[in-house]
Image (cartoon, coloured by chain):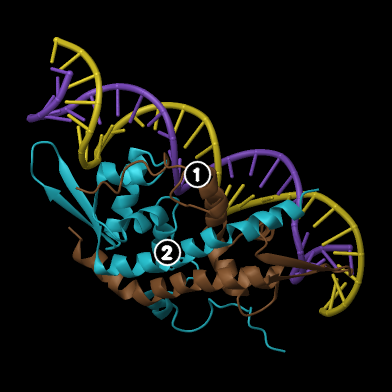
Chain colours: A brown, B cyan, C yellow, D purple
Amino acid sequence: MSDAASTPLDDASLSGRFLRGDLLSANCPSRDVLKHMTSRWGVLVLIALEHQTLRFSALRRMVGGVSERMLAQTLKWLEGDGLVERIEYDVVPPHVEYRLTPLGQEGAAKVRILADWIEGNMPAINQHWQSRQG
Amino acid sequence: MSDAASTPLDDASLSGRFLRGDLLSANCPSRDVLKHMTSRWGVLVLIALEHQTLRFSALRRMVGGVSERMLAQTLKWLEGDGLVERIEYDVVPPHVEYRLTPLGQEGAAKVRILADWIEGNMPAINQHWQSRQG
DNA sequence: GTAAGTACGCACAGAAATGTAAGTATCAAG
DNA sequence: CTTGATACTTACATTTCTGTGCGTACTTAC
């Protein structure tokens, strides 16, 4: 019997796994990036910015339900990971634009694949919920 | 000037958006599914189950760091969405297996695309962190 | 007899995410 | 001169998530 499920962490080169990025290993820093990208608002921000540069308020109006606080927080996370770029114009009524970096473009595309799949399969999933009522 | 960021919620057929799945709309149920699939352990469970059926304990050993409680919780979410199937054998030492449904297979593939991208780009992201120290 | 494995459920607690409300500085509109 | 828009920040409250530890019912191993 193959025992594929045994102790993936005890294998050699654990540090190598972390540098390379191994999500199945506990404490791998890649999980932080995953957390940012898949956070409640992270996904939606990436998708909203995929095809356009947006200002803070415009982005907030676009992503239904975000609070200012959370939008700012999320943008900082993504900026910290190098996925989003913040461009500030030093004018009197504040003017700041957000856009994806090349890295962010790539990442957003992957996120969108997942989002599109979910949106497209909502009927099937809803149907599953219906059939298990009771 | 195009104003693409204006009030996406006020458009007609809001209920249609929900049935179809529109993540940018607040309160759309698709956000729940997204939450389950992108939850801390949801991603990892989907990936772990993608190519094999696993028992509870084996799954737990495979996904580094999950508690029993969270694994059970996550599996229930995914089962509720019709992505994971629970197969129980009525034997004396409990024996339960978890596997992906066809829908789950599809979804897991999308999640894996994202996970693989993150794992593959960790060096670039880490580098970005280095360069912004200070 | 004692410990461990199996697949959880339950209760409590702490951590983390998120929401709400208010404040900052400046300008334009009414 | 009050309101609204801009892009946030900070404090506080709440909700949600996640972890820890214990209990279950039964069997095998020591």
- How far across and how far down the image is residue B48, in percent? 34, 54
- At label 1, counting other C-alpha atoms closer than 10 Å, the crowd grade (few under 14, some 14-19, many 20 or more) is few
Disc 1 versus disc 2: distance between alpha carbons?
23 Å
Q: Residue at x 41, y 56 (%)?
A: B43
Which chain is mark 2 on? B
Q: Residue at x 15, y 43 (%)?
A: B95
A107 with respect to B29 (left or right): right
Q: Residue A13 has which mark?
A: 1
Q: Residue A30 has which mark?
A: none
- How far across and how far down the image is residue B112, in percent? 42, 64
Which chain is mark 1 on? A
- How far across and how far down the image is residue B52, in percent? 26, 57
Q: Secondary structure at mark 2?
A: helix
Label 2 is placed on what type of residue?
A: Arg
Extreme-bottom residue of the structure: B1
Q: Residue at x 32, y 61 (%)?
A: B50
> To which quarter of the image does residue B79 belong?
bottom left
One can see residue A82 in this view? yes
* Closer-to-camera residue (B53/A69): B53
Q: Residue B112 has which mark?
A: 2
- Mark 1 on the same chain as mark 2: no
- How far across and how far down the image is residue D24, in percent? 16, 27
A14 with respect to D23 (left or right): right
